Amino acid sequence: MKSTLFILLKSPYEYHDLDIIKTLRGGKAAAILFEDATLFSVCNKRRTDLLDVVDDVFVIADDLEARGFKDKAGEGTQVIDYPHAIDLIMDEYDQTITL
């Protein structure tokens, strides 16, 4: 079964419907939070909602810091840098879907 990496760019206040992730995921699924989507990692309810539909959540450290949330990513999220994100996209998952 294919593994899927979802790339999220919009804040949890702009992007509400995580059901599409449930529909599109195959086997293993993860999400990388870029830009305003990093807010998923600091908002307890939205982070929990996201963790209910994917196995792993990664958040970009620079994007967290740019929004004033350095070292504030919540439990269950892994803070990563851009080179790690490239490794995830290119090597560790079969497909990526940007939402």
Image (cartoon, helix red, strand yellow):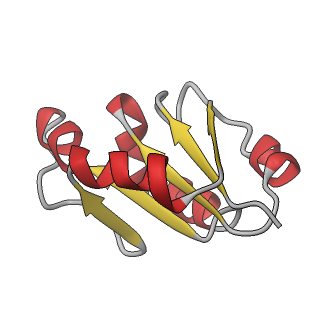
Whole-percent x and y of residue 89?
47, 47
Task: Report the residue that reaches farthest toward the bottom.
Answer: 75
Instruction: Relative to 82, say whether 15 is above or below.
Output: above
Query: Does residue 42 show up?
Result: no
In the rendered structure, the answer to whether residue 33 lies left or right of residue 79 reads right
Whole-percent x and y of residue 30?
57, 59
Looking at the image, which residue is at 18% across and 34% down?
67
Looking at the image, which residue is at 37% across and 43% down?
39
Identify which residue, 88 or 50, lies in the foreground.
88
Instruction: Relative to 20, say whether 46 is above or below.
Output: below
In the rendered structure, the answer to whether residue 93 lies left or right of residue 52 reads left
Query: Does residue 28 show up?
Result: yes
In the rendered structure, the answer to whether residue 39 lies left or right of residue 54 reads left
Identify which residue, 42 or 28, lies in the foreground.
28
Identify which residue, 4 or 57, lies in the foreground.
4
Task: Report the residue that reaches farthest toward the right.
Answer: 23
Whole-percent x and y of residue 2?
77, 60
Quarter that holds the C terminus = top right
Looking at the image, which residue is at 46% across and 29% down?
9
Looking at the image, which residue is at 35% across and 45% down?
86
Whole-percent x and y of residue 47?
50, 59
Quarter that holds the N terminus = bottom right
Instruction: Relative to 3, say whether 6 is above or below.
Output: above
Number of marks in picture: 0
